[in-house]
Every structure is written in C-alpha cells, then in structure tokens.
Image (cartoon, rainbow, N blue to C red):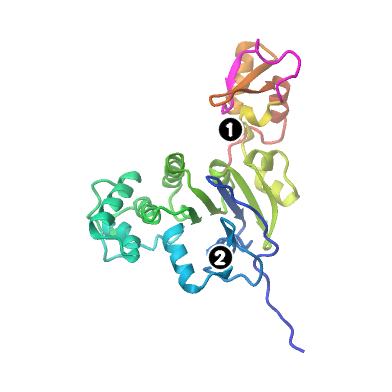
Amino acid sequence: MRVDKRIPAVVNADFDVSEGEIFVIMGLSGSGKSTLVRCLSRLIEPDSGEVLLDGDDILKKSPRDLVQLRRHKMGMVFQDFGLLPHLSVLENVAFPLKVQGVAETARRRRALEMIALVGLEGRESASPRELSGGQQQRVGIARSLAVEPDIWFLDEPFSALDPLIRRQMQDEFLRLQRMLNKTIVFITHDFMEALKLADRIAIMKDGEIVQIASPSEIVLNPASAYVADFASEVPLARVLTAADVMAPVPVTGGAGDLEKVPATMPLEELAAEFLRRGVPRLAVMSPETGCVGVVASDAVAQVFARPGAGRESA
C-alpha cells in the first residue's frame, strides 16, 4: 500500500474579497500565506476547490485563457522586485503592455503615467542598478499597475526594505489605493503592517485560516491564544480609534447635544480630549454620514487598563 506523505500547505481556506478592499493575509513563516496567494493566481495549482473571480472559476480555465487573465486582470508584486536589469525604468514599466501587443506610443504614455503616479518622474531612463531598494519597488508597483488590473496581489512587497523606507512605502501604497480603489490581496508577516493597511485581516496557522476580522476586532477580540500573541505587543492607544470603542447612538436623547470628535481620532488623543473637555461622553462623527456613535470615557479607560495598551511595539 502506498502512503501519501504529502503535507498540506493550505487547508479549507474559504473567504471572499470585496471590490475595493485591502484583504491582508498574515502568519508566521511556513503558515501557508504565500502558497495561498499563489493558488489564487494559479501560479500553484490547488488540488481541489474553486477560485472564483466575478463568479468565474479560474481553475477551469485553459492555459491560454489563464495567460490572458493574468495579463489583463491581475497585477502581481513580490518581495523580489524582479526588474529586468537590461531595461530602463520606462521600459520595465511598459514591458507587460508590450507583451499584450499595445502600440509603442500608447504603452509609453501609460508607462509615463504610472511612473508619475509612484513619484519617479525624472528617473525614466535610469537602469534598476541605479535605483535604491525603495525606488526599485516603486518600479515594480508601477509595472504591475500598467495593465490596469482588476485585482492586485502583493506578496510581502516591502519586507526586504529598511524600516524607514518600508514605512514610506506603506504610506505610498495607501495613497495609491485612495486614488485607484483596487481590489487587493496583500501578504505580510508583520502584524503592525497588517493593522496599518488592512480593511480585513486573515490570520493563518499551519495552512489554516484561524480568524478573519477587521484590525480592531482582531486586537480587541482575538479568536485564539495564537492570534492573541500577535496582538500582545500592539500599542492599543495608537492603533485603535474612537470608532473602534464607540457605542450606538442612543434611541432616546440621541447625541445632538454632545461635543464632537472624528471617528478616526486615535485613543491616545481621545483620552486627552476627555481630560480637556471634562465630559463623560462625546459624539463620534464621520465626514460622510455624520454622527455614527457615542464614545464614553469609561470605554477609553478600559482599553488603557489592558496590559501594554500604551506600549510602543518593537
């Protein structure tokens, strides 16, 4: 009898990614996160299951159709920048359009737009070896966006960068997302990076997804001790906002007479506001929808009472 000794890398991974969402998959090395994102694009062939894009199972596509799907609907950025060393910045960014058969004038125009978008104007003629690590990663991002993908896969794109450059690239990434509103699957092993970037986070362990939730829910209500370990060093007062600890607007009385704070105000600033204003409750305001809740000073105090609530992460 033949015994199958294969070790499954991803098991029963079931999730949806909404249009315009930044969906972050994170876990320790070997947890299966990179394998999972490669299954989504069929760089690795899953043994079973479905991968649905707009209701169409890409696992059933022919090799030719899959190539077209990757060329026209998917953008990919990996830890290894993968730039072609013999091509200039402009030529690297335009390369996927050349593969598509786009005319030279049109692909040059699009490449220049993407280079400007990532802030590399003036470096169009430079070769990759003349760029810093952060600049090379910007070229990789511009190249992946040149084809105007519907969905964007990023596998630890900033992990090889120095901490300062990494933070700058995270800010740049969020700026681009505000402009482009892409559907994004982002892989990282850095919990603070996940908290900063994600709309929702999926945490993996031994090939399985152990929790999917918003960043604040994972910090405040971890599903297991494994998830809690990730959140144990998080400075809650800087990560959480007024929206994360607010309560619904009371049915009777409302919040019309309460002083107001923005929903995005970090808790450390919110605590200072309670001390300055000397009130027990504040109305939480969203620029889009107005009053979205009420936050009490007791709720903020409960967060600060947690171990490590104000501690800086390493």
What label does residue 80 carry, if any? Answer: none
Q: Which residue is drawn at 58% across and 37% down?
A: 312
Q: Where is residue 279 in the image (x, y as percent from the top left)?
A: 67, 12
Screen quadrant of the C terminus: top right
Pointer 1 residue: 238
Whole-angstrom CA distance, mark 1 to mark 2, is 41 Å
Q: Where is residue 259 in the image (x, y as percent from the top left)?
A: 61, 13
Screen quadrant of the N terminus: bottom right
Which residue occupies the foreground of this view, 83 or 43? 43
What label does residue 58 carry, if any? Answer: 2
Q: Which residue is drawn at 60% across and 53% down?
A: 26
Q: Which residue is drawn at 31% across and 64% down?
A: 101
Q: Is residue 103 left or right of residue 215?
A: left
State yes or no: residue 197 in magenta: no
- Amino acid type of the residue tagged 1 in the rendering: Arg
Query: Image height check: is 274 above or below 267?
Result: above
Magenta segment main secondary structure: loop
Q: What element carries label 2?
A: helix
Badge 2 density bin: few <14, some 14–19, many ≥20, Cα 10 Å: some
Q: Where is residue 304 in the image (x, y as percent from the top left)?
A: 68, 29
Query: Image height check: is 305 above or below 7?
Result: above
Which residue occupies the foreground of this view, 110 or 223? 110
Give, as a single range, the part of the protein colored magenta.
248-265
